[in-house]
């Protein structure tokens, strides 16, 4: 999956979801674009769009917590706790994946075709908390 295809506007993917009685419903969802990811992240204090490893990134006070991958698999790299990464991968949710490069590191890879905006918002918030300086986190709690 090429990296910047999401920015060019992808075609909708069909997703099945279980409903009562065992029926499945087909829903169409558009892939999130980098611009939408930035919009969600910049709702958080002092988040700025930047670059990291020569790719688009999000940072809080200069500390990176998310970047758009240019590697073949694409996806969004997002900082997380190791236990959370393991739980997301174990869940079987196709929105979450990893590669050998990220094994042992607290980063989850997210398929922007498959994640819901509200779910991504929560994950961005958690990544922000892991990256933001203590004083900034403290200001947010008051």
Image (spheres, rainbow, N blue to C red):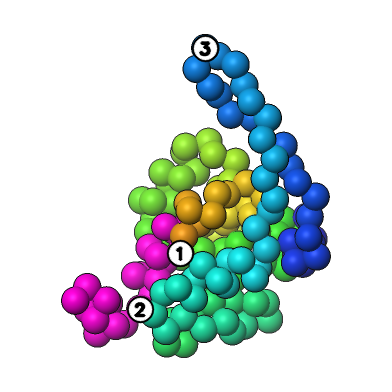
Please tell me whether the stretch drawn in magenta is mainly helix, strand or loop: helix
Q: Nearer the viewer, residue 31 or 85?
A: 31
Residue 60 marker: none
Q: Secondary structure at mark 2?
A: loop
Numbered circle sitting on residue 124: 1
Numbered label tally: 3
Q: Position of residue 7 (x, y in %)?
A: 75, 67
Q: Circle 3 is placed at which residue position?
A: 21
Proximity of marks 2 and 3: CB atoms separated by less than 8 Å: no
The C terminus - image quarter: bottom left
Q: Residues within 10 Å of mark 1 (few under 14, many from 20)?
A: many
Q: Locate residue 8: give its quadrant.
A: bottom right
- Tell me the quarter of the image containing the N terminus: bottom right
| Residue depicted at 69% across the width and 53% down the height | 31
Q: Which residue is more in the foreground, 134 or 90?
A: 134
Answer few, some or many: residues within 10 Å of disc 3's Cα (few below 14, many 20 plus, some between 14 and 19): few
Residue 131 on the magenta span: yes
Instruction: Please give the name of the residue rendered at 59% of the width and 76% of the height, measured from the top-left corner.
Output: 57
Q: Residue at x 55, y 14 (%)?
A: 22
Between tags 3 and 1, which lies in front? Answer: 3
Q: Mark 2 or mark 3: which is in front?
A: 3
Query: Can I make out residue 47 in this image?
Result: yes
Locate residue 4, reporting x and y percent. Answer: 77, 67
Vertical arrangement, residue 89 with respect to residue 71, above or below: above
Q: Residue reaching furthest top?
A: 21
- Magenta-highlighted residues: 122-142
Determine whether 130 is above or below 80 in the image.
below
Mark toward the start of the polypeptide (2 vs 1) = 1
Mark 2–mark 1 distance (CA, rounded to whole Å):
12 Å
């Amino acid at each position: 999956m090429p990296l910047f295809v999401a920015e060019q506007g992808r075609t909708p993917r069909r997703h099945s979801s279980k409903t009562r009685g065992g029926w499945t419903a087909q829903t169409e969802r558009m892939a999130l674009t980098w611009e939408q990811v930035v919009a969600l992240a910049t709702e958080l204090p002092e988040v700025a769009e930047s670059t990291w490893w020569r790719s688009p990134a999000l940072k809080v006070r200069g500390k990176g917590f998310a970047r758009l991958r240019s590697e073949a698999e694409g996806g969004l790299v997002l900082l997380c706790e190791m236990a959370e990464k393991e739980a997301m991968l174990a869940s079987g949710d196709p929105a979450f994946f990893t590669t050998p490069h990220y094994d042992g590191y607290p980063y989850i890879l997210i398929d922007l075709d498959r994640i819901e905006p509200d779910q991504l918002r929560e994950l961005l918030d958690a990544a922000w908390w892991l990256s933001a300086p203590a004083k900034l986190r403290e200001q947010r709690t008051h």
